[in-house]
Amino acid sequence: MNTRQMDFCIELAKTLNFSRAAENLFVSQPTFSYQIRLLEEEVGFQIFERSGKGAALTPAGAQFVTYLANMREELKRAIEQGQNFSAKYKDNITISLMTREVLYFLPEAMRMFAKDHPGIQITPKFQYENGMESFLKNEADILFALKEETRQIPGITVHDLFESRIYLISQRDDPLTKKNLLKEEDLYGKTLMVGGGSPPALRAVQQRLIASGKIDYFNSADHDTTLTNVAAGRGVCLAPGFLNDHSGQFAWTPFDCTEHFSCCLCTHKNDARESLASFVDLLKQLYRDAVAIPL
């Protein structure tokens, strides 16, 4: 099966008309019909039922075309990425992170790195889940992680990056924002959103507050849902400082607790590229020099 046949099949599934599909793809109808027949012979089942009125997808064909369309879109993106890369770059460093916010200095690091390494591309790869699994499959060169997640994993090098504390996220006009440091009793009577893939340190604080019996709570599916609920005035939440996008939409007030997060970068031990080491060192330096950005 080639990309031409894939395009023919997807177009016929849209139009359900051989003549119109062939016209849309600028080929003759005999050529178009021949390629569809070759494709069906290759996959071993009938994709389309023919009739005098045109074509209709068989049940197997409908399922096949759904997967085929997704595959074609992925292939298109891969080709475009390859074209972009081959035109300008000689090497690529992929960094996996759960959200854009977790590495506040990543854009600055990319700008600075490009000045000294114009032939090397830095590619962010956002993976809210399964980032570690993807990294261990060598699908990324650098992984942002919490240090607790990296213990006893062979074949990786862990680079300490920064320590992040816990903050309360609230609307900017919430009376709690008048305090410089919030304590447990400040949240009594409030509604606290919990869950949403919270790391163990944060879950421990949430559970401690719930055990007091003096707060209301409800489960939130993920961080974005939680922020939407905070914006809607449905409650407040606790979150790691590294999730702060510093947009000013919400108030982030430090919460008094011993729990914190050790944030790090992971690389593969067998990746000895000087460019990779330089980029990691650049990110580490930016965080060492940070004074105005609360983490």
Image (cartoon, rainbow, N blue to C red):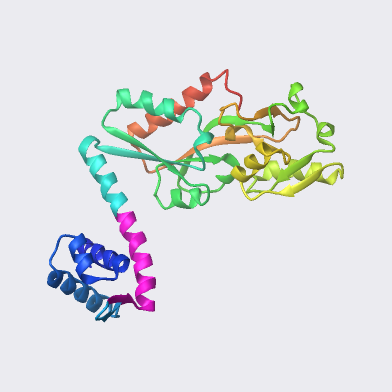
219, above or below 262, in the image: below
Counting from the top left corner in percent of width and height, residue 252 is at 66, 29
For the point 28% across and 76% down, the residue is: 55
136 horizontally vs 148: left or right: left
For the point 63% across and 48% down, the residue is: 197
Q: Which of the 4 image quarters holds residue 191?
A: top right
For this orientation, the residue located farthest to the right is: 213
205 horizontally vs 213: left or right: left
For the point 13% across and 70% down, the residue is: 31
Q: Which residues are magenta?
A: 54-75
For this orientation, the residue located farthest to the front is: 53
Question: Which is the main secondary structure of the residues drawn in magenta?
Answer: helix
251, above or below 41, in the image: above
- Asked if residue 104 is among those painted magenta in the image, a careful observer would answer no
Q: Nearer the viewer, residue 121 or 149?
A: 121
Image quarter of the C terminus: top right
Image quarter of the N terminus: bottom left
Counting from the top left corner in percent of width and height, residue 285 is at 47, 23
223 horizontally vs 49: left or right: right
38 horizontally vs 161: left or right: left
For the point 64% across and 44% down, the residue is: 199
Counting from the top left corner in percent of width and height, residue 50 is at 26, 80
Q: Which of the 4 image quarters holds residue 91?
A: top left
Counting from the top left corner in percent of width and height, residue 149 is at 58, 45
